[in-house]
Image: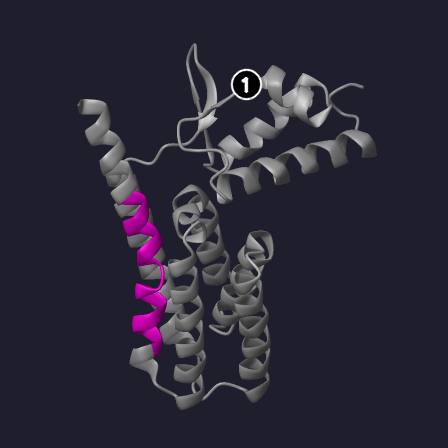
Amino acid sequence: MNARDPPSAEVSNGLADVIGALEEDIIFGRLKPRERLIEEGLARRFAVKRHVIREALAELEDHGLVAKERNKGCMVRDFAIRDVEQIYEMRELLQERAARRIRLPVDALLIARLTEIHRAHVTAIAAADLRRVFHLNNEFHDTLFAACGNPYLTESIAEYAYLAHAIRSYRIADPVLLRQAAEEHAQMIAALGGGDREELVRLCVEHINPAKEAYLRAYRLQLGAYLG
């Protein structure tokens, strides 16, 4: 196959499967920051050629989940304190702007849809179904921020949420923080239904902070242990 040929369905599906599995490993904390991603071992795990692994790692690197270091290969990206603060500054700015753009009062259909997603999210948390928790959480926020009416803003919010996967994993691993997130979703729905703009803005901004703080606590503990 030359560079102009499209990949076969088998290769395409294999690549997508590898990317999806590695994303989930990072999201759910099975792969930790700075953990090495060794091509040979991953090729055995997924029963694919090493070039598929290289393509998957390159795509994850493009999206900011994986870092490549000279003479060391690829590893899960490690976010320093400054990185985390800057990423979350952007997330706060974007989500605040989206919340301010949502026209209040919102359509009853939006309230009904968010309520439906919220109930499914609560059920998934109770069942400790973390994969479903993660996807329902994303669906809730995608649905909420789509109401801002600016698809470019909505897409930017999703992109920064994706970049923060390794940071957000510290919330999804904590049942207390998951229940807090679900409670805040309910409060967002109430703010939308009641036309309370400032409460909605506050919730959309503060909602993302527990994951950031959990990551930073773990980072500082790890740094302290390293420094001895």
Total count of labels: 1
Residue name at image x 43 percent, y 86 percent: 104
Circle 1 is placed at which residue position?
38
- Badge 1: how crowded within 10 Å, few (<14), some, or many (20+)? some
Residue 208 lies in the magenta-colored region: yes
- Identify the element where label 1 is drawn: loop
Q: Residue 35: x and y, percent? A: 44, 26
* 207 left or right, relative to 152: left
* 221 left or right, relative to 178: left
Query: Between 136 and 1, which is closer to the camera in this rendering?
Result: 136
Please state the extent of the stretch shown in magenta in the rendering: 200-216
The quadrant the C terminus occupies is top left
Q: Residue 139: x and y, percent? A: 56, 63
Name the residue furthest top. 71
Query: Between 123 and 163, which is closer to the camera in this rendering?
Result: 123
In this rendering, is residue 85 above or below 208?
above
Residue 39 lies in the magenta-colored region: no
Residue name at image x 72 percent, y 19 percent: 49
Name the residue furthest front. 127
- Three-letter code, disc 1: Ile
